[in-house]
Image (cartoon, rainbow, N blue to C red):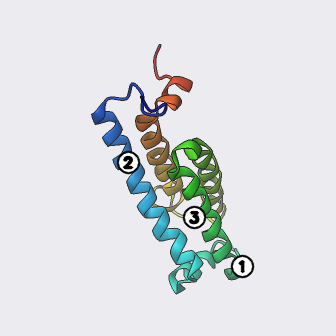
């Protein structure tokens, strides 16, 4: 029986998508865990953004929940949508305080492109929903 999500996906495309998604997953696991654990570096990073420091564990849990949805195949698109919202908030926060554009502000865009690109390459349902060409 052919998997609905990977049906019609060439092996190289699926591997490339898995690799891109793995980069996103590893980064977000690290980022979410250090927020939940209240690492001092997180407090240093959140202070200039104007967020109360006691919010970092909550943000970390939300990030990890979105990541779990992203990793589980039946909910991966929902996870990507929610992750995009989370990354959008980070982008807006960095933009608001005037952080450097390419290194800080657009970092959420980079992660989002990798997340959606990985999902697009490995999920035939998404490619049929958003074809690059007809």
- Closest to the observer: 91 or 128? 128
**Residue 29 x %, y %:** 48, 66
Q: Residues within 10 Å of mark 3 (few under 14, many from 20)?
A: many
Q: Residue furthest front?
A: 1
> In this rendering, would 127 be left or right of 91?
left
> In this rendering, would 47 be left or right of 109?
right
- Closest to the observer: 52 or 75? 75
Q: Residue furthest left?
A: 12
Residue carrying label 1: 52
Q: Residue furthest top?
A: 134
Q: Of discs 2 and 3, which sits in the foreground?
A: 3
Q: Of discs 1 and 2, which sits in the foreground?
A: 2
Where on the picture, by quarter, is residue 81? top right
**First in residue order: circle 1 vs circle 3:** 1
CB within 8 Å, label 1 to label 2: no
Residue carrying label 3: 64
**First in residue order: circle 2 vs circle 3:** 2
SS of the residue under disc 2: helix
Which label is found at residue 96? none
Q: Residues within 10 Å of mark 2 (few under 14, many from 20)?
A: many
- Placement of 4 over or under 35, stated as above or below: above
Residue carrying label 2: 20
**Residue 43 x %, y %:** 59, 82
**Residue 99 x %, y %:** 55, 64
């Amino acid at each position: 029986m052919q998997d609905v999500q990977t049906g019609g996906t060439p092996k190289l495309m699926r591997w490339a998508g898995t690799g891109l998604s793995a980069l996103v997953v590893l980064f977000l696991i690290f980022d979410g865990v250090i927020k939940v654990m209240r690492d001092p570096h997180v407090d240093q990073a959140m202070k200039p953004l104007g967020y109360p420091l006691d919010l970092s564990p909550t943000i970390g849990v939300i990030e990890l929940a979105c990541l779990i949805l992203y990793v589980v195949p039946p909910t991966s698109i929902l996870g990507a949508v929610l992750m995009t919202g989370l990354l959008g908030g980070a982008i807006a926060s960095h933009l608001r305080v005037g952080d450097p554009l390419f290194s800080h502000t657009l970092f959420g865009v980079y992660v989002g492109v990798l997340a959606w690109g990985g999902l697009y390459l490995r999920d035939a349902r998404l490619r049929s929903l958003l074809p690059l060409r007809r």
